[in-house]
């Protein structure tokens, strides 16, 4: 794969065989970010579980103390009094069947997170085939199926992120922007990793966190030591 000069220069600062202390790793990522835009910083955590088994799933959500640096567009499926509750909390779109039809007929996806009150899941279930593959289907585990739609919207707007395993047993999650600086990024990273550690399934055996890598949008990955998290 071709890599530009800036990427290659950043890569020279990193020893691929070393697991860096979290602060040092983030410092390398911030210093190595050379794009003209404010790069997103992501954390990739490989776990010693098998996502094919239901009792080894790792999924949840956590509010990052410093947010993600991105304004999330929230769609809420609800009705009656909760419509105003959702709007007051800052939801971008609120409705019911008319939104289902807009998504299915117009291929409309101008939203980042979907929240639903439990009484609307019969309606939302019709969107499973289109929302599921995009990772947008609301779920009780992620706190996006809830009677408290207002609180859910506020948390998402404040920086709540969902984490879940992919097919290769890796969690990919944004922890902020390069402009946050090392201290704020580390606060977010600590919050996310500790949430993942707390979510360890009882069926998981052996080493839980196999590897942890932090990376900016255009930069090289930096391996992170997870000793401080008790792994």
Image (cartoon, helix red, strand yellow):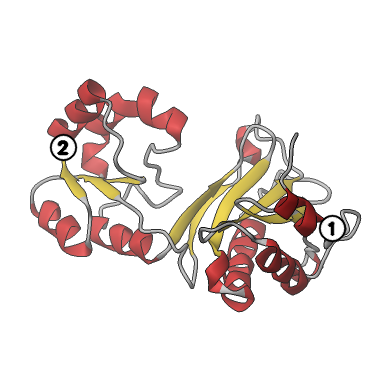
Residue 41 as seen in the image, left or right of residue 70: right
**Horizontal and vertical percent position of residue 32:** 70, 62
User: Left or right: 42 with respect to 147?
Assistant: right
> Dot 2, crowdedness within 10 Å: few (<14), some or many (≥20)?
some
> Which of the pair 44/30 is nearer the observer?
30
Measured from the top left, where is residue 134 in percent x and y?
A: 44, 33
Which residue is tagged 2?
Answer: 96
Q: Picture coordinates of residue 65 (x, y %)?
A: 49, 72
Closer mark to the observer between disc 2 and disc 1: 1
Residue 32 seen anywhere in this rendered image of the structure: yes
Residue 123's place in the image compared with 183, above or below, is above
Q: Earlier in the sequence, mark 2 or mark 1?
A: 1
Q: Which residue is mark 1?
A: 12
**Residue 220 in sight here:** no
Does 148 sit left or right of 45 as displayed?
left
Image quadrant assignment for residue 169: top right
**Residue positioned 60% across, 51% down in the render:** 217
């Amino acid at each position: 794969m071709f890599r530009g000069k800036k990427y290659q220069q950043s890569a020279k600062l990193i020893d691929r065989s070393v697991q860096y202390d979290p602060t040092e790793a983030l410092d390398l990522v911030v210093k190595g970010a050379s794009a003209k835009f404010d790069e997103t910083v992501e954390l990739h955590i490989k776990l010693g579980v098998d996502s094919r088994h239901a009792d080894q799933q790792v999924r949840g959500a956590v509010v990052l103390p410093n947010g993600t640096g991105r304004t999330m567009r929230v769609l809420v499926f609800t009705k009656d009094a909760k419509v105003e509750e959702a709007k007051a909390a800052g939801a971008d779109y609120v409705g019911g069947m008319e939104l289902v039809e807009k998504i299915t007929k117009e291929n409309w996806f101008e939203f980042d997170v979907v929240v639903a009150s439990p009484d609307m899941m019969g309606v939302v279930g019709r969107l499973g085939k289109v929302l599921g593959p995009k990772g947008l289907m609301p779920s009780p585990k992620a706190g996006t199926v809830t009677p408290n739609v207002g609180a859910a919207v506020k948390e998402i707007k404040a920086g709540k992120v969902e984490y879940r395993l992919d097919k290769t047993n890796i969690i990919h999650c944004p922890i902020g922007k390069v402009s946050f600086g090392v201290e704020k990024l580390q606060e977010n990273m600590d919050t996310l990793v500790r949430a993942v550690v707390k979510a360890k399934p009882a069926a998981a055996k052996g080493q839980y966190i196999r590897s942890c890598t932090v990376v900016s949008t255009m930069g090289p990955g930096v391996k992170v030591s997870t000793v401080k998290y008790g792994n």
